[in-house]
Image: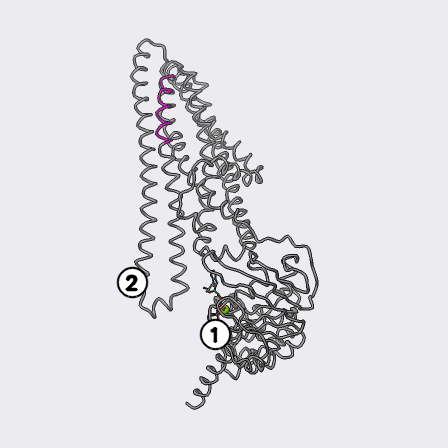
Amino acid sequence: MSKSHSAPKSLENAFVVYSRLFTYVRRYWPSLVIGIIASMVYSGIDAWFVYFLKVLVNKGLVAKNHEFLSTAPILVLVVFIMRGLASFLSNYNIASVSRSVIMKLRQDIFKHLQRLPARFYDHSTSGQVLSVILYSVEQVANASADVITTAVQSFFLVVGLLIVMFQTSWKLSLLYFFIIPLITVVMRYTSLRVRRLSLSIQESMAALSHSAEENLEGYKVVRAFGGQTFEAEKFDKAARVNRQREMKVIAARSWSVSSVQLIAAIALSVTLYVATLDIADSILSPGGFISLVAAMLALLKPMKDLTSMQNKLYRGIAGAETVFELLDEKPEEDKGTYTVPRVKGKMEFRDVGFSYDAKKTVLKEINFKIEPGQVVALVGRSGSGKSTLVSLLPRFYTDYSGEILLDDVSIGDYTLASLRNQFSLVSQNVTLFNDTIANNIAYGRFNDVSETEIIAAAKAAHAYDFIEQLPNGLQTLVGENGVLLSGGQRQRIAIARAILKNAPILILDEATSALDTESERYIQSALEDLIRTRTTLVIAHRLSTVEHADKIIVLDDAHIVETGNHAELLALNGYYAKLYRMQFKDESVDIEN
Ligand code: ATP
Ligand code: MG
């Protein structure tokens, strides 16, 4: 995503994009057909009216046919009622197609986003993705609806008017055809330009929403560090760039519309000149003359619409290109077929290596085994790869080397759903939804959970005490990502969620780091029951919390430096012992103070 926003895309595949877009439009064909037929009727009536002028003048005014003059007003009224109806049906149905396409595209994008791998999210900002869902998709609507409406209405009007003109005087009408190549040249030039600009407008929209979004989320840091001016300048620039690019499109569009109209007007004046000569030779009736001029004047608007339609079309194609590019991002692989209701919890890493990018190895030669029911701790300095290691287990990243086995089956052989069912994960960054505490705890078990179970989980996570004190208890709203709660409270809700999920393997990544020592001890003892019946992987900086683990794996600089239990590692007097002594010293200093 991020790359595609900087490089201009090829302009050749407009046809491919449009035919793909058409597969969306096609779904709503009944409305589309009604809309198109109504548009034809609408334009037909307009063309007919220009023809009717000739009859009106010749029969009514020149020949003074009374019978005709008395029926004409009624005829006009009836025809215009039909015209109104056709106009409504055409606009309504075609807009309905376009809104449906928008809805469908948005739904498809969202579904697709849920299947995209962690790497996609590592490399794209939510601002970019939001701008695709909100902005680019709307551009597509313009391409599908407005363009279809204009194309159909204007095309039939042009055809209708040309028929009227030719029928009136084909010689004079031929003149009009000289301008077509000229108009094509103008249109081709602008369309290329507009299409290029449309892509860059989308980029600027993405930058704009990215900047706004980051500021909304990080408003506290911005203010605390006095970054308002810096941020405002960044946003101003993004807004300015967006305006400039929009204005360039508007300039290009206005220029082409005026040029086309000018060309048409020149043709009109030449025709008029010749027509006056023609009238002198009395080839043209007065009605015919009026009708011819009216047709030529009436041609200006659909021609203008067709010109500006092109630009909308290209904006839409640019939008669709971005949308399809997102839809074409490769989803997570889910080729495994093995399913199991509940694993025993045996895990094994065999020579596992991993890196996020080619530059730096994050894990190398990782070998260890965890027996069912064991508690294994991962320790090591910040950045040593602990979180990365556990993120391989639920297959958030799949391009690791070596093998990872769960119950002696490679994790790649499981279906994703079955594999992920086996883990209760409390990650380093707690994610809460803007919903009630109860729903946050019960997340993942949407319909089959009783309040008693929720309360039990909250109690086990040592969260119920504070929940009870909240005005609405379990029904309290937590705010966006839990802003209305304290850091430790958020962690406890996340732990309660993991407890309620009741998966055979529990992964706690710094799950109690925000808690005071006392709460941490409480949770630990509460977790003990839980831990006894399942396999647990704990990541912790505070070594006092992992002393009782069956096995402690010490990571440093991407690989395992030591393994053993607390006593063994102390006896080894290596990395762990050093780390432990350092922390012990800190803690005793704390106590002395
Ligand atoms: P901490 O104790 O601070 O949580 P950690 O041991 O959990 O550290 P990891 O989060 O696994 O460390 O990160 C290991 C290395 O991988 C770091 O150098 C980090 O910069 C890098 N890294 C982490 N996540 C990503 C990512 N999504 N894309 C690229 N690099 C990453
Ligand atoms: Mg980490």
Look at the image and tell me whether residue 353 can be seen: yes
Residue tagged 1: 487
Query: Horizontally, is 167 left or right of 253 in the view?
Result: right
Is 280 left, or right, of 366 in this rendering? left
Residue 452 picture location, percent across and down:
65, 75
Question: In front here: 215 or 167?
Answer: 215
Magenta residues, dominant SS class: helix
Q: Quarter of the image holding residue 34?
A: top right
Q: Is residue 567 above or below residue 61?
A: below
Determine which residue is flagged by label 2. Answer: 229
**What amino acid does circle 2 point to?**
Thr
Where disc 2 sits, the SS reads: helix
The image shows residue 341 at horizontal and vertical percentages of 70, 63
Disc marking residue 477: none
Disc 1 and disc 2: Cα gap in Å?
29 Å
Residue at 47% x, 68% y is 383
In percent of width and height, residue 141 lies at 47, 43
In front of the other: 509 or 403: 403
The disc labelled 1 sits on which kind of residue? Gly
Give the image location of residue 280, x and y in percent.
30, 10
Front position in the image: 444 or 475: 444
Picture quadrant where residue 157 is located: top left
